[in-house]
Amino acid sequence: MKILVITVSDRAYKGIYEDKSGAVIIKTLEYKLKNKITNIEKIIIPDEFDIILNTLNENKEKFDIIITTGGTGLSKRDVTPEAAESFCKKEVRGVSDYLRQESMKETIFASLSRMYAGINDNIFVVNFPGSEKGAEYCTNLIIPLLEHIVSMIKGEGH
């Protein structure tokens, strides 16, 4: 699998804040999927709809999976789900519902997360929260699904 992790954070992009959520996603994926990942990369971008959408478009041919972290909250600057939805051709609501439902077992604040999951041709996109703990938790939740998702999107069946 080829995976891109995009941290969406004005502060991390400006170097004001260390990107802990993107780092923990990479660390968890590498540890748990070490023999199944052929490429994993991380980038940091600001909370800007056009930049998020352009980044998704620029990378759709290079990766099987794009995981974003950050920008899923309620502030005016949180536009990651809107950009992901604009990019994707099909929503995979079951994944975002599953992540939110399981996360609410850890904290009621997960009910405020606007995580989105969808596909565009041969790429799966999912939004994780920007907190380190939330990002790690969601990564662990989705790992068992990733191989199957990629296989299904590529038409390889079950």
Image (cartoon, grey):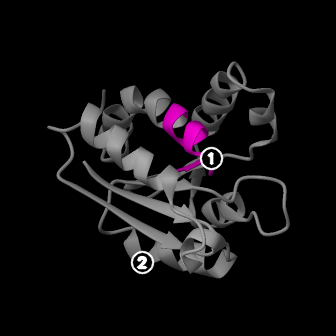
Q: Nearer the viewer, residue 137 or 2?
A: 137
Query: Would you say residue 119 is visible in this rendering?
Result: no
Marking on residue 55: none
Q: Is residue 128 magenta?
A: yes
Percent x, y for residue 68? Answer: 53, 56
Going by the numbered disc 1, the residue's amino acid type is Ser
Marking on residue 131: 1
Badge 2 marks a residue whose secondary structure is helix
Whether 57 is drawn above or below 111: the answer is: below
- At label 2, counting other C-alpha atoms closer than 10 Å, the crowd grade (few under 14, some 14-19, many 20 or more) is few
Give the alpha-carbon distance from disc 2 to disc 1, as whole Å: 26 Å
Q: Residue at x 53, y 35 (%)?
A: 138
Q: Quadrant of residue 53?
A: bottom right
Badge 1 marks a residue whose secondary structure is loop
- At label 1, counting other C-alpha atoms closer than 10 Å, the crowd grade (few under 14, some 14-19, many 20 or more) is some
Q: Residue at x 56, y 44 (%)?
A: 132
Q: Nearer the viewer, residue 34 or 3?
A: 34
Q: Which residues are magenta?
A: 126-137
Q: Quadrant of residue 92?
A: top right
Q: Can you identify the residue that label 2 sits on?
A: 58
